[in-house]
Amino acid sequence: MSSAMSVSQTARQPQMISDWASCSQAQMTVMEALQALDQIVDESDPDVDFPNSFHAYQTAEEIRKVYPGLDWLQLVGLLHDVGKILSLWGEPQWCVVGDTYPVGCRFQDSIVYRDSTFSDNPDLKDPRYSSLYGMYEPNCGLDKVLMSWGHDEYLYNVLKTNGCKLPQEGLYMIRFHSFYPWHTEGDYMHLCSSKDLNMLRWVKEFNKFDLYTKCNDLPDLKELQPYYQQLIEKYCPGKLYW
């Protein structure tokens, strides 16, 4: 999360999407992208001081224990933070990691560091964006909501652009796992459709594994890679556009 933002986030997000949504930065396999996480320690996460690649396998392995028959869910655990590779391509970490939230409507109090972060943001005083619904209709659905840009939105876009075969539940987990004001604090329900509410239980379930598998007992990545390579080939094969 950045310090005070003096630029309209609602105006900024379309530019971020335009910069990255073309997926023209690189071509590489999912395993190559995972290996790039060896270079990233998430500065916003107080629970870990080791590369994100270990957290990816920790999350996936715990899901594998609890849900041995849901291989797509295991793969979601492995992939969920891969979008943080944006920080290797010039984006500052505060633009990539951390919690996400809708822009274009009132910032809810549950957004971490809301007061200090957004004190100078012009959206707070813009009547188009400062009301409860802002530029949205009641219960319009999260697919019609402009979310703050970060690793969640980026990876979701990569998977959709490349036609990856994860089920809808998995894509929701990836896209909204950092949307803590929604899945943990219960805010923004006024924007949700019935589909979003049905998917919420899956996002909440995933959150348990994302949060509570971080420990200093680090897995042997090389030993685990053959198993997860099979899952990658099943759902996200070959070189992807990033």
Image (spheres, rainbow, N blue to C red):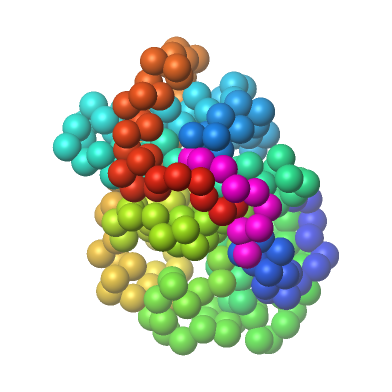
Up/down of 188 relative to 182, above or below? below
Q: Residue furthest left?
A: 69
Q: Is residue 157 left or right of residue 107?
A: left
Report the label total: 0
- Residue drawn 36% across and 31% down? 228
Q: Nearer the viewer, residue 130 or 177?
A: 177
Magenta segment boundaries in residue numbering:
22-30
* Magenta-drawn stretch contains 44: no
Q: Position of residue 136 (x, y in %)?
A: 51, 84
Q: Nearer the viewer, residue 52 or 184?
A: 52
Residue 179 makes an appearance in the image: no
What secondary structure characterizes most of the magenta part?
A: loop
- Residue drawn 64% across and 38% down? 44
Residue 39 picture quarter = top right
Up/down of 154 relative to 37, above or below? below
- Residue drawn 26% across and 30% down? 64
Residue 141 makes an appearance in the image: yes
* Magenta-drawn stretch contains 24: yes
- Residue drawn 47% across and 58% down? 162
Residue 11 picture quarter = bottom right
Up/down of 40 relative to 96, above or below? above
Up/down of 41 relative to 113, above or below? above
